[in-house]
Image (cartoon, rainbow, N blue to C red):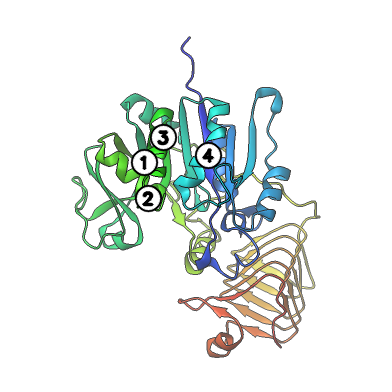
């Protein structure tokens, strides 16, 4: 029986997430709550574990306490079977400096590779919402003999300025450009391009050699997409993996191929709205490919005195008392009091909505308090003077803020 290749997972989770401020004011981007029960990091870790990869190092740096705590308390694997998921903070192994880029983060953490001695290394980002079977990506990489395989998703060519764009000749990558204005379309569909998903699989020696070359290049900013992948493209050893070919068990026709970069407040908000329709654009209820997390120890949600929620997701411990919730994601331990109205909003853990308050198109971070009779998302001009408002008009209150009456 042939030996299965040994695969090590590395998750890049040091992102500051400036465009998600104020949600990242007190936490790293991968630790931002999502979908009621989850953190963004749970999606990539669930994909890797579901795909059979259970030796994973999560490289952290920026405001990582809540992320480290979540990983160590939630993602406990069987040490008996040699499995582990461990946060790895910046260790300054190569001198008194922090990570200067995503490639440098791996270069400074090569002791992890030397200790594990894998045949292949999957390097995934930590802040996207999607389902993917990474074993299918690895299988193509092993079969092809490439040095690196980059996961690409088909997007309209008009959106090229939002992504790192992969230009190909068949599966071979011929160019890798950051946000080009006018890239060529795909050979089988000129109106589409391959956008990089930030997910890679490397043959171990290829990664080691390229990291050393990049570290010695004083002109490099030591970024995976900006420096390392273009280097390997020039060497002719880079291939693309078409995400459309990925077949995840239990996927519906509606959510097959779903992938969202939730790097802005508007994309973060829109991704939540994708969850709450009758036939959701992204289905969290796929039991064949679950998204894992550690649920809070709270009683079931309670609806009293005529309280109701429609086309919404409501977490444990929530009390809706004589209030109305529509088209919203309500995280655990939220209390919405009599006569309040919540519509099209994302409420994080511990939010308190006072009687007769109105909250529309808003994101309220953990432990936000909305006093009785307060209005949020009703008068955007007034909201802009008091709170943070996204370009599309979503009102965002940071962690622990008490809204004004």
Marks 1/3: CA–CA distance: 13 Å
Secondary structure type for disc 1: strand
The local crowd at label 2, few if under 14, some if 14 to 19, many if 20 or more residues have their Cα within 10 Å, is few
On screen, residue 266 versus residue 54, left or right, reads left
Residue 252: give x, y in percent of width and height. Answer: 46, 45
On screen, residue 186 versus residue 55, left or right, reads left
Residue 4: give x, y in percent of width and height. Answer: 49, 19
Q: Nearer the viewer, mark 1 or mark 3?
A: 3
The residue wearing badge 1 is 150
The local crowd at label 3, few if under 14, some if 14 to 19, many if 20 or more residues have their Cα within 10 Å, is many
Secondary structure type for disc 4: strand
The local crowd at label 1, few if under 14, some if 14 to 19, many if 20 or more residues have their Cα within 10 Å, is many
Label of residue 207 in the image:
3
Tell me the quarter of the image containing the C terminus.
bottom right
Circle 1/circle 3 CB separation < 8 Å: no
On screen, residue 307 versus residue 214, left or right, reads right
First reached walking from the N terminus: tag 1 or tag 2: 1
Q: Nearer the viewer, mark 1 or mark 2?
A: 2
Q: Nearer the viewer, mark 2 or mark 4?
A: 2
Query: Would residue 117 be visible to someone looking at this image?
Result: yes
The residue wearing badge 4 is 10
Q: Quadrant of residue 319?
A: bottom right
Query: Which residue is depicted at the point 46% across and 57% down?
Result: 261
The residue wearing badge 2 is 218
């Amino acid at each position: 029986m042939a030996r299965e290749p040994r695969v090590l997972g590395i998750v890049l989770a040091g992102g500051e997430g400036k465009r998600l401020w104020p949600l990242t004011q007190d936490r790293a981007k991968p630790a931002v709550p999502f979908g009621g029960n989850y953190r963004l990091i749970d999606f990539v870790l669930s994909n890797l574990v579901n795909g059979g990869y259970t030796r994973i190092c999560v490289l952290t740096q920026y405001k990582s306490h809540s992320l480290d705590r979540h990983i160590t308390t939630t993602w406990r694997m069987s040490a008996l079977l040699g499995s582990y998921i461990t946060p790895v903070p910046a260790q300054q192994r190569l001198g008194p400096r922090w990570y200067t880029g995503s490639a440098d983060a791996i270069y400074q953490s090569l002791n992890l590779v030397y200790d594990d001695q894998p045949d292949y290394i999957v390097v995934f980002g930590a802040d996207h919402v999607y389902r993917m079977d990474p074993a299918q990506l690895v299988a193509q990489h092993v079969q092809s003999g490439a040095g690196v395989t980059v996961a690409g998703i088909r997007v309209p060519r008009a959106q090229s300025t939002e992504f790192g764009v992969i230009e190909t000749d068949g599966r071979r990558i011929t160019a890798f450009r950051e946000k080009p204005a006018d890239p060529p379309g795909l050979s089988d569909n000129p109106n589409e391009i391959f956008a990089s998903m930030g997910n890679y699989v490397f043959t171990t020696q290829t990664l080691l050699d390229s990291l050393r070359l990049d570290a010695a290049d004083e002109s490099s900013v030591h970024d995976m997409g900006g420096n390392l992948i273009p280097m390997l493209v020039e060497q002719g050893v880079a291939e693309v993996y078409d995400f459309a070919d990925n077949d995840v068990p239990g996927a519906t026709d509606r959510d097959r191929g779903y992938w969202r970069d939730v790097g802005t407040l508007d994309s973060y908000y829109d991704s939540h709205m994708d969850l709450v329709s009758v036939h959701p654009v992204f289905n969290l209820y796929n039991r064949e490919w679950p998204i894992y997390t550690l649920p809070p120890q709270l009683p079931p949600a309670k609806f009293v005195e005529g309280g109701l929620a429609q086309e919404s997701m409501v977490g444990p411990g929530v009390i809706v008392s004589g209030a109305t919730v529509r088209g919203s994601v309500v995280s655990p331990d939220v209390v919405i009091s009599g006569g309040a109205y919540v519509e099209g909003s994302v409420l994080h853990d511990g939010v308190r909505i006072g009687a007769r308050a109105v909250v529309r198109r808003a994101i309220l971070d953990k432990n936000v308090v909305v006093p009785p009779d307060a209005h949020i998302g009703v008068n955007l001009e007034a909201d802009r003077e008091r709170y943070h408002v996204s370009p599309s008009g979503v009102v965002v209150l940071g962690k622990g803020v008490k809204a004004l009456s």
